[in-house]
């Protein structure tokens, strides 16, 4: 196990200040000297972490196992389920299908940075209000995707549900459903997830 | 996953030099296909050359009025580009019919073209597969082949190309620019980019070792109505069983290519000349000589119905 980094309480996005956090490195570097490592500087939720990682480390494992930001979940580890969805430079990706080393200098936002229990992001609050989960395992990924898709609609990113490609994109129910299709929920909380996102859309309109 | 060393390339020339100089090295762009296959140890590169910082992520107008799309443009950015949405709608539609929003944000144009096949036996390292291990045999022939190709196959491999974007690029007559270690760029028409399996199913692309895709170019727009219809096992987020990319003109002529049915996007110019005669005539000509298995023979009538739907859509 690697040493736990000290997470500053102010690592939320709203109060993001770039702080240098201690670098939890590989615990037994000498015993693994034959395994290639690389140095990575990850900026997660406004905090910069200097890490030395086995090159094979996915962004997901770096977040969970090295930075102990366990809000981001591992479902399939193969890009199928969306439990590992995080925002990188403002767009959502699957953290399991990316190497930590590929994110040197990128700005990463996880569910922990989106909001805190005392200062919830409106989407987090909407998920709570609509009971948009059962076991909660897919929820961080669902919320990160939900936040990102509203921005994608705003930016005119089309989806399979889009009618006229050149018209202004609408956050209709079919658009929301299609755009959320990369986030699987084994508990089948889809209808409440849909309601939570629709409420935010309605509030924003 | 096997250990590997990693570097971020500073220039296209440096990236190509690194891959050429290191045995077992590969480029990595989005990583959404390569890392997946590395986790299964189907791909086992010893060295990864990350190309994402290279200046190949722009979309520019060409002098002839077409588009030059950098190899590192993400699938999302390509589908969202105003000119692509306006003039090459079939391309936007094909891209967003594939994968998920998260994956499309990460996936690059070059990597999408080079995604490997989705034959279930290719993914199962416990069984023979001529693509994975040349000479070991093909488990799909005589096995479960529902999703696989019906035409363009060989005695050694019946896998289909699984991509959506490439089917649209095929109807648009895209060209692929690739740079080699000598710094020379050559252009490969998309019709020649995907190799049929013949006797060498492990060789899937016309790219030579060490060549880096730098861009994809599109000729000037051809007008018409643009369609991509994908038939899959779920309403969203699944690979194509059959797909149809088409550009249709008011006089009934047009272009059409099929996805999910062959080792490459399947476009037969002689067949598309039958468009004014309707979907049955087109499909009869396009699938002339098909060798479906018992499991996937349904794909041919399905292709016909999908095309009929697209033609009806085109008539408005
Ligand atoms: C769950 C899931 C569902 C999917 N569903 C679909 C779908 O429905 N339809 C569909 O079409 N696709 C689908 N895909 C595949 C997806 O489109 C590809 O994974 C993606 O396009 C690959 O792009 P990339 O940049 O991530 O490639 P990478 O994984 O980085 O690279 C793929 C290959 O290309 C090589 N390469 C990359 N860039 C270059 C370059 N510039 N020059 C030379 N070589 C290069 C790499 O060495 C590697 O061999 C799915 C993928 C997943 C994981
Ligand atoms: S069809 Fe091709 S990919 Fe599938 S098992 Fe046979 S050789 Fe391998
Ligand atoms: S854990 Fe990344 S998509 Fe399932
Ligand atoms: S709430 Fe349990 S998986 Fe979605």
Image (tube, coloured by chain):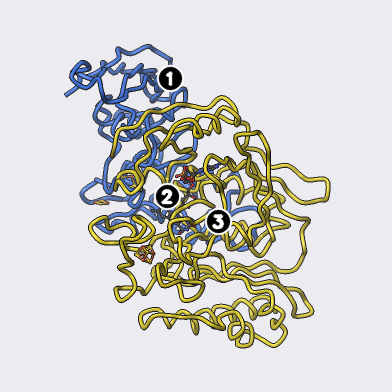
Chain colours: A blue, B yellow
In this rendering, the label closer to the viewer, 3 or 2:
3
Task: Using the rendered view, name the quadrant where residue B146 is placed.
Answer: bottom left
Q: Which mark is residue B95?
A: 3
Question: Whole-Å distance between the Cαs marked 2 and 1?
Answer: 25 Å
In this rendering, the label closer to the viewer, 3 or 1:
3
| Viewer-nearest residue: B113 or A86 | B113
- Chain under label 1? A
| Residue matched to label 2 | A197
Q: Is residue A163 above or below residue A5?
A: below
* Residue A3, position as x, y percentages in the image: 20, 18
Task: Using the rendered view, name the quadrant where residue A73 is placed.
Answer: top left
- Chain under label 2? A
* Residue A77, position as x, y percentages in the image: 29, 45
| Residue matched to label 1 | A16
Question: Whole-Å distance between the Cαs marked 3 and 2?
Answer: 25 Å
Q: Is mark 3 within 8 Å of ligand 1?
A: yes
Residue at 33% over, 70% down: B140
Question: Whole-Å distance between the Cαs marked 3 and 1?
Answer: 35 Å
Whether residue A205 is visible, yes or no, is no
- B276 relative position to A8: left or right: right
């Amino acid at each position: 196990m690697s040493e736990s980094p000290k997470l500053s309480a102010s690592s939320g996005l709203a109060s993001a200040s770039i702080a240098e956090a201690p670098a939890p490195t590989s615990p037994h570097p000498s015993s693994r000297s034959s395994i290639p490592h690389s140095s990575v500087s990850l900026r997660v939720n406004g905090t910069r972490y200097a890490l030395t990682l086995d090159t094979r480390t996915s962004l997901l494992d770096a977040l969970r196992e090295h930075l102990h930001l366990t809000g981001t979940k591992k479902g399939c580890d193969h890009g199928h389920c969306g439990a590992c969805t995080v925002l990188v430079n403002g767009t959502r990706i699957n953290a399991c299908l990316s190497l930590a080393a590929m994110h040197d200098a990128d700005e990463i936002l996880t569910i922990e940075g989106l909001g805190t229990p005392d200062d919830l992001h409106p989407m987090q609050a909407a998920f709570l209000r609509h009971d948009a989960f059962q076991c909660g395992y897919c929820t961080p990924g669902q919320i990160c995707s939900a936040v990102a898709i509203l921005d994608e609609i705003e930016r005119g990113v089309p989806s399979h549900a889009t009618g006229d490609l050149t018209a202004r994109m609408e956050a209709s129910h079919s658009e929301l459903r299609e755009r959320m299709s990369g986030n699987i929920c084994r508990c089948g909380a889809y209808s409440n997830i849909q309601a939570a996102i629709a409420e935010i859309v309605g509030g924003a309109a | 996953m096997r250990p590997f060393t990693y570097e971020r390339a500073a220039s296209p020339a440096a990236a190509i030099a690194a891959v050429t100089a290191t045995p077992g090295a590969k480029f990595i762009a989005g990583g959404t296909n390569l890392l997946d296959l590395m986790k299964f140890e189907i791909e086992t590169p010893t060295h990864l050359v990350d190309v994402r910082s290279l200046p190949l992520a722009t979309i520019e107008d060409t002098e002839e009025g077409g588009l030059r799309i950098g190899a590192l443009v993400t699938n999302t950015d390509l589908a969202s580009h105003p000119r692509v949405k306006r003039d090459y709608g079939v391309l936007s539609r094909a891209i967003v019919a594939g994968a998920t929003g998260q994956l499309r944000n990460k996936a690059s144009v070059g990597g999408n073209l080079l995604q490997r096949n989705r034959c279930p036996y290719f993914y199962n390292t416990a069984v023979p597969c001529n693509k994975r291990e040349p000479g070991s045999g093909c488990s799909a022939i005589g096995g479960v082949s529902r999703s696989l190709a019906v035409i363009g196959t060989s005695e050694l491999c019946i896998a289909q190309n699984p991509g959506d974007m490439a089917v649209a690029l095929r109807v648009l007559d895209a060209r692929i620019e690739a740079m080699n270690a000598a710094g020379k760029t050559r252009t490969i028409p998309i019709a020649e980019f995907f190799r049929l399996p013949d006797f060498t199913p492990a060789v899937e692309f016309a790219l030579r070792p060490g060549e880096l895709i730098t861009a994809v170019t599109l000729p000037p727009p051809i007008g018409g109505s643009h369609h991509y219809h994908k038939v899959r096992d779920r309403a969203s987020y699944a690979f194509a069983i059959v797909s149809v990319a088409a550009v249709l003109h008011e006089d009934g002529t047009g272009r059409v290519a099929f996805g999910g049915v062959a080792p490459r996007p399947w476009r037969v110019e002689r067949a598309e000349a039958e468009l004014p005669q309707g979907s049955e005539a087109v499909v009869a000509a396009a699938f002339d000589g098909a060798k479906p298995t018992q499991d996937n023979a349904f794909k041919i009538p399905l292709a016909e119905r999908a095309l009929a739907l697209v033609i009806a859509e085109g008539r408005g």
